Amino acid sequence: MTDSPVKLVSLLTDFGEQDGYTGVMKAVMLGIAPGMTIIDLTHEVKPQDIHGAAFLLQHHMRFYPPGTLHVCVVDPGVGSDRRILAVEAQGQFFLAPDNGLLSFLQELGETRIHEVSNEKLRLEQVSMTFHGRDIFAPVAAHLFNGVPLEKLGPRLKKMTRLRLPAAEIDRKKKKITGSIIYVDRFGNLITNISADMLPVPAEKTRVTFGPVALGTPKSHYAASEPGTVSAVFGSFEKLEIAVANSSAAQYFPDYATRSVVINWS
């Protein structure tokens, strides 16, 4: 084994834990690279939710050390002619289908993109419905063992773009209008309004969610009485709609159709 720039592997999938898909991916990787350390970023992305996977990766990757390889298998196009990409960016490495999941990386700075086309790095038999096991896992293990990106396939200049919904700032009307882009396990509704978008302190703003006035954002969930709807800037550093000790997603089943507006004076 040569000295490899890949020191750690994380897995992000929509496989869940029921069917053994993630376990067999790890078995394949460890069979090729026994010394590999693997972290489960999550396997609970909603099935085929590329936007959700991109959101989670974009937020969480900064907490991983340099040399991390993120293996991302949310792949509605598995078995089709879609490409598989290996990308180096921000001191980390990424494997994912070319479906837009990694396109946010190009907004962060310089990227090195290669198509994964070297069949010698795959398992001998490749299922058309489980590239996670037969392509992503062995390629990740070979990268951990020191195989350089250029051995995976040709270098590319661009990848498929994924447009994530953006909040709109109207400075004349002193408001930001956003939408729900992610729902966490607790039913908190995560918006695309970031704390750093505010031109004034959060305590000088007011939030409405559709027709519901929520007032000033709270500092934490327990600042509201149980069952009370509130706005909170949470750990994603985004404005969230929350119901204390309950689920905002259940409280507002029409959440996807509601806009979120934050005003200031």
Image (cartoon, helix red, strand yellow):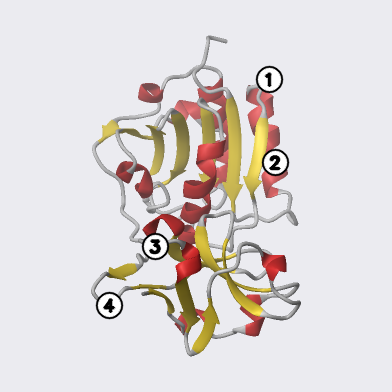
- Residue on which disc 3 sits: 200
Residue at 73 percent across and 80 percent down: it is 227
Q: Is residue 88 visible?
A: yes
Of the residues tagged 2 and 4, which is closer to the observer? 4
**Marks 3 and 2, Cα distance to the nearest angstrom?**
50 Å
- Residue on which disc 1 sits: 35
Of the residues tagged 2 and 1, which is closer to the observer? 1
* Residue type, numbered disc 3: Val
- Residue on which disc 2 sits: 24
Q: Is residue 208 above or below residue 198?
A: below
Mark linked to residue 173: 4
Q: Mark 3 or mark 2: which comes first in sequence?
A: 2
Q: Mark 2 or mark 1: which comes first in sequence?
A: 2
Q: Mark 4 or mark 1: which comes first in sequence?
A: 1
Q: Is residue 51 above or below residue 175?
A: above
**Marks 4 and 1, Cα distance to the nearest angstrom?**
57 Å
* Residue type, numbered disc 1: Gly
Q: In what quadrant of the picture does the N terminus appear?
A: top right
